[in-house]
Structure formats: structure tokens, C-alpha cells
Image (cartoon, rainbow, N blue to C red):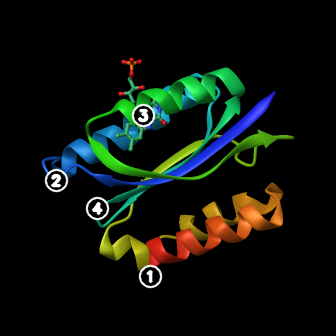
Amino acid sequence: MHYAISYVSTVDTDLETQEIKDLLAHSKKINNERNITGLLLFSEGNFFQVIEGNKMKVKNLFQKIKDDKRHHGIIKIFEKEITRESYNGYESSFLSEEAKYNDPSLQYYINYLKVLDPKSQNTIKSILRAFIS
Ligand SMILES: Cc1cc2nc3c(=O)[nH]c(=O)nc-3n(C[C@H](O)[C@H](O)[C@H](O)COP(=O)(O)O)c2cc1C
């Protein structure tokens, strides 16, 4: 059974830029090793994440993420069973001011959403737009 969870959250103010970049890189490595697909973006103090994969794996990972003291104010956007994953692998990105305007991968992230149902697609698109603008 494939499962997907998406949320936004706020970074802990004590976290240094390098620690955030390390967290993004570490999540990408581990998730790709464990067949968790999705996306983790960081922009101006907020995280946006989608995790997809085996239901138990995704639920267990989300529990760990919720308990992680490096962020707070987690707002779940959706949690549901899916017919197949939307993402081919796991991506993470630190969106600096500069990257927001120049990073071609943002369009790539949006293209990933095609297989989600229209309602979820629209929700994610508007959140991504808020992250980008
Ligand atoms: C915003 C945020 C997103 C995270 N995303 C992931 C993730 O996608 N995959 C992952 O393995 N850990 C992620 N983590 C780290 C987990 O919370 C946890 O530290 C990690 O799963 C290691 O747990 P373990 O040592 O018990 O295996 C994230 C942490 C934060 C703060």
C-alpha cells in the first residue's frame, strides 16, 4: 500500500544555515536508500515536505519527524493512500533568495505533481508558489 503525507513547519530559530543544509542532504540520502520518495524544501524559516512510500514506513518516519526538536508548528496538508508515487526519487532543496528566481528545479518539482489528484495538486501548487514568491 502506497501512502503519502505532506506538511509545512517552522524551523527552530537556533538552527544554523549549515545545519539546515545538512538536514536536507541527510534526508535525501536516507530516503533514497529506503525507497521513500518526495520532496523537502526549506525557504525563509519554513519547511515544506512530501513523503511517499510504503504505508508503515511513511507513518513511522512522520512520527520521528514530528518528534524532531529542530522544527515546530507542524501543519499537516494531507495524509492519504495513493495509487502510486508522484515522485521518482527524493529531492531536497534549500531555496536561497537567489535560487528562488533562478532555480529551474522548481518547475521540475511542480511537474512532479501531475499524478496527484487535482485537489491535492492545487493545494501543493499554491504552497509551492508561496515558497517561491
Ligand atoms: C523538517 C525535517 C524533515 C525531516 N525529514 C526527514 C526525512 O525525510 N527522512 C529522514 O530519514 N529523516 C528526516 N528528518 C530527521 C528525522 O526527524 C530523524 O532525525 C531521523 O529520521 C533519524 O532518526 P533515527 O536516528 O531514529 O533513524 C527530518 C527532520 C526535520 C526537522
Whether pointer 3 and pointer 2 mark residues with C-beta atoms closer than 8 Å, the reply is no
- Tell me if residue 109 comes above or below residue 129 in the rendering: above
Which residue in the protein does label 4 denote? 45
Under tag 4, what secondary structure? loop
Q: Residues within 10 Å of mark 4 (few under 14, many from 20)?
A: few
First along the sequence among labels 4 and 1: 4
Mark pair 3, 4: CA separation: 16 Å
Point out the frontmost of discs 4 and 1.
4
Q: Is residue 115 visible?
A: yes
Mark pair 1, 2: CA separation: 22 Å
Residue at left 87%, top 41%? 83
Of the residues shown, which amino acid type is indicated by label 3?
Ile
Which residue in the protein does label 3 denote? 65
- Residue 75 falls left or right of residue 2: left
First along the sequence among labels 3 and 1: 3
Which residue in the protein does label 2 denote? 13
Measuring from the top left, give residue 48's x and y in whole percent. Answer: 47, 56
- Residue 79 falls left or right of residue 85: left
